[in-house]
Image (spheres, rainbow, N blue to C red):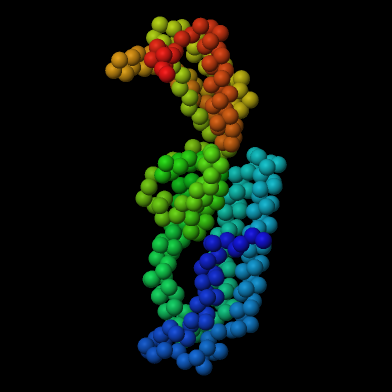
Amino acid sequence: MQRLPFKLLPTLLVLLLIPAAPLAAQSNGEPVHLSELGNIIRWSGVFASIIWIAAAWLILRLASRFVEAFAGEFSSRRMTLQKVYTVLQFVIYVSSTIAVVLLSFRMDETTLAVVGGSIAVAVGFAMKDLVASYIAGLIIMLDHPFQVGDRVEFGGEYGDIIAIGLRSVRMRTLDDNTVTIPNSKFLTDLTSSGNYGELDMQVVLDFYIGPDQDVDLARIIVNEAALSSRYIYLSKPVVVLVNQWQTEFLMGVRLRLKAYVLDTRYEMDFQSDVSLRVLRGFRDNAIAVPAAFSNAG
């Protein structure tokens, strides 16, 4: 059985604070007596809150499986489905927390003082970083520096954003590792998004040839290699830029290909496919790479 998502922690925290509520101070500074516990807590509401949390977890699990299934069948709708699921997560987390509070407590001045004091102590000593991540998560949702499904580079990691939560962002790298990044990290660090909500994404590939080689022919080979790839997105332009490449000791010509892959998932396949076509074309037409590259190793 799948465990409850960590993002439901604020809701669960409310339930955990219920037994400790009598220990919190009232507004006049006096502790709440145990006999007053029944006047603050709705025990039937606590049971209903547990059912609410279980239902929220079940809805999230079903929604997640629905998105995974339909995103595989309808790739053109993958980004939209992932965005809808992200918004659904936020709505369920926030509504569940509010529902638990309203169901479990009788809202009056004493209750507000008890619950507010308990939460303030918990936040102050144990949840400062967690709450900061929640606030950052809301900022990410409103500011949209990236979206679910974007191919992003952050903190030395590169991959697809698979979930944006109240506490953290999950990224799946190209090596199929899942990286969890606290939301607060995104407030100060630089983030680069390759596609920003689109399925297609620009891919840049560099090819080098010697300065005495047929540059025009090499440019044609690179351009045709991209256009003939099964992963190319032809609705956007294919560009091959040519410029002189030089280091302290060597000189050559660099051909920089800028083309769009039809889906971010095929980025590496596209790079491999085009590179093989270009290398074969260079070999068949006797186009040599700079000496330092051909003699390396």
Instruction: Tell me if residue 252 can be seen.
Output: yes
Q: Quadrant of the C terminus?
A: top left
Question: Who's the residue at 45% across and 47% down the image?
Answer: 145
Which residue is farthest front?
297
How many numbered marks are there?
0
Q: Position of residue 195 (x, y in %)?
A: 51, 38
Q: Quadrant of the N terminus?
A: bottom right
Q: Is residue 129 above or below residue 124?
A: above
Q: Position of residue 178 (x, y in %)?
A: 53, 47
Q: Quadrant of residue 182?
A: bottom left
Q: Is residue 236 left or right of residue 129?
A: right
Question: Who's the residue at 68% across and 42% down the image?
Answer: 72
Q: Foreground: 28 or 33? A: 33
Instruction: Tell me if residue 160 can be seen.
Output: no
Q: Position of residue 234 (x, y in %)?
A: 59, 26
Which residue is farthest left?
248
Question: Who's the residue at 32% across and 18% down the image?
Answer: 247
Question: Who's the residue at 47% across and 86% down the image?
Answer: 22
Q: Is residue 98 above or below residue 181?
A: below
Q: Quadrant of residue 132?
A: bottom left
Q: Is residue 221 left or right of residue 186?
A: right
Q: Is residue 34 above or below residue 168?
A: below
Q: Position of residue 232 (x, y in %)?
A: 59, 26
